[in-house]
Amino acid sequence: MLAHTLIFYFFSFVTVASSLAVISSKNTVHAVFFLILDFVSISCLFIMMGAEYLGMLMLIVYVGAVAVLFLFVVMMLNVNLRDLRTGFLSYLPFGSLIGIVLLIEIGMMIGTWKFKDNFIKTSEIKINTQLSNTEAIGNVLYTDFLYYFQISGLILLVAMIGAILLTFRRKDNLKRQDITKQIMRERDDGVSLEDVENFKGVKLND
Amino acid sequence: MLNNYLNIILIDSLKIFSLLIPVLISVAMIVWVDRRVWGLVQLRRGPNVVGPFGLFQTAADALKYILKEIIIPAGANKVIFILAPVVTMSLALLAWAVIPFGENLYVANINVGILYLLAVSSLGVYGIIMAGWASNSKYPFLGALRSAAQMVSYEVSIGFIIVTVLLCVGSLNLVDIVIAQKKIWFAIPLFPMFIIFFISALAETNRPPFDLPEAEAELVAGYQTEYSGMMYALFWLGEYANILLMCAMGSILFLGGWLSPIDIFPFNSIPSPIWLIVKILLLFFAFALIKAIVPRYRYDQLMRLGWKVFLPLSLTWVVIVSGFLVYFELLPTKQ
């Protein structure tokens, strides 16, 4: 048990320290790297709790895909910290207001925890303790909570379509490559043999 | 109590070393195989001077890299620049922990083994992005961007391919996946998936014809441009360790892992690791042949292949396979 506790404290220390580093590091790219370290140590914590499926999904989805896109955007932005500091005083009142509201909300969330209403009654979920947690999640996710699962899928789909629409720009002078058309093209479509008379030339329709 | 922990640590490190040292040696050998095959296809001799058949060529290369000076560009971000090859190499070796060489022959047998493999291979992109960004130079950065986009896109179809296999197995454990192929290897019923997996593995490991991140005609050497000496060698070894890992993954998912092709006397008495190694080598031979005979893809065609061809195809196969399994009541169920 001692080793378990030690490893738990190691991972939780790394989690907290790296999340502090995310908001305090001067270089934005470094901040994203700390965020990745944070994700990795959180997934290690999941695995330590016995939720190995969630931990691995965290690694695949957040670290393997989301954080890569984060990194992409941040690397391309070339944020200059000096420019960011110029408006510090003018943004201070509004920013601190949001900060205070957030702090109060988090405090209230912890304070009112015991009055919480059960949206999904956890006692209704029949969990077979013999199964590994991948199978246990699958058993309830695709049967009892099928509608929630489908609705969350729809929300993601709508978000995806929205993102594509926002970045989609139609360009008229763009040449598109149609691979099937290129493959279907025969020799006769492009080449023709013409008899050219001397001093008269030939008219081609192209 | 402390004695107990010491025991665990000692036994586990022994296990890890007895896995890692053969893997590292085979990575060195595989580089030689790759160059020999490449040479033979092009009617050259390939490396044949150092040692018998040039077998020690990689050792000589490694010695050369060790002796060379490591140059860190003045504008580079030093920490990340040094970290990048280390990340690449260690991630490539990390994944070998779950590869089963026999029914009881593995370093770790975890419930979600295949997800672990997928996770570690998706982390591999960080080594490349870090190298590209930290070099603070145009070509490495462009190479890193290309590589990241390419690896993320092909991971999606690899994910779906894994889903089709998992539907037939009913477990995420690698040992279970191999045992489920006792009757028939998944390469036969899922043949199109096997081909897509193979091509996606080529793209995932940045092998030709998908080696655009280091396309020397456009990007010098891509993300490796600024690296020299041992750090370059680490990238190089990490890349080949990744290729071997992809071959191992392919043979476990589709070619029956450590199982012998026919379950009769002379074949099933051969020790199981040898079968796995033979399958890995076969897949690697195909990798090496393709490097020699296929010209490089154009970048937009590569993206088109990933998103518009492989993704719909593998998604449809997931639907078809699950429909087939449900209709004929073949779904694997836990008793």
Image (cartoon, coloured by chain):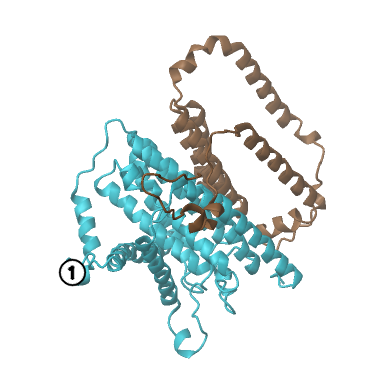
Chain colours: A brown, B cyan
Left or right of residue B232: residue A77:
right
Residue found 48% across the figure and 60% down from its top? B199
| Residue ID at (22%, 57%) | B61
At which x and y percent is residue A69? 52, 39
Residue A38 visible somewhere in the drawing = no
Lateral position of residue B294 relative to residue B28, left or right: right
Residue B50 higher or lower than A87, as above or below:
below
Callout 1: residue from which chain? Answer: B
Residue lying furthest bottom in this view? Answer: B265
| Depth check, front residue: A124 or B282 | B282
Quickly name the residue at label 1.
B51
**Image x and y of residue B169, in percent:** 63, 68
Placement of A29 over or under B329, stated as above or below: above
| Count of marks, rendered view | 1
- When asked about the image quadrant of residue B164, the answer is bottom right
A92 or B324, nearer to the observer = B324
- Judging depth in this view, the residue of A35 and B296 nearest the camera is B296
Residue at the top extreme, as displayed: A90
Is B112 placed left or right of B95 in the picture?
right
Secondary element at image label 1: loop
Q: Is residue B320 visible?
A: yes
Q: Residues within 10 Å of mark 1 (few under 14, many from 20)?
A: few
Q: Amino acid at mark 1?
A: Gly
Q: Position of residue B325 (x, y in %)?
A: 71, 69
Please name whichever residue, B165 or B268, is drawn nearer the observer in this view of the structure: B165
- Examine the rendered structure and indicate whether residue B333 appears above or below residue A55: below
Q: Where in the figure is residue B64, as x and y percent of width and height?
A: 19, 53
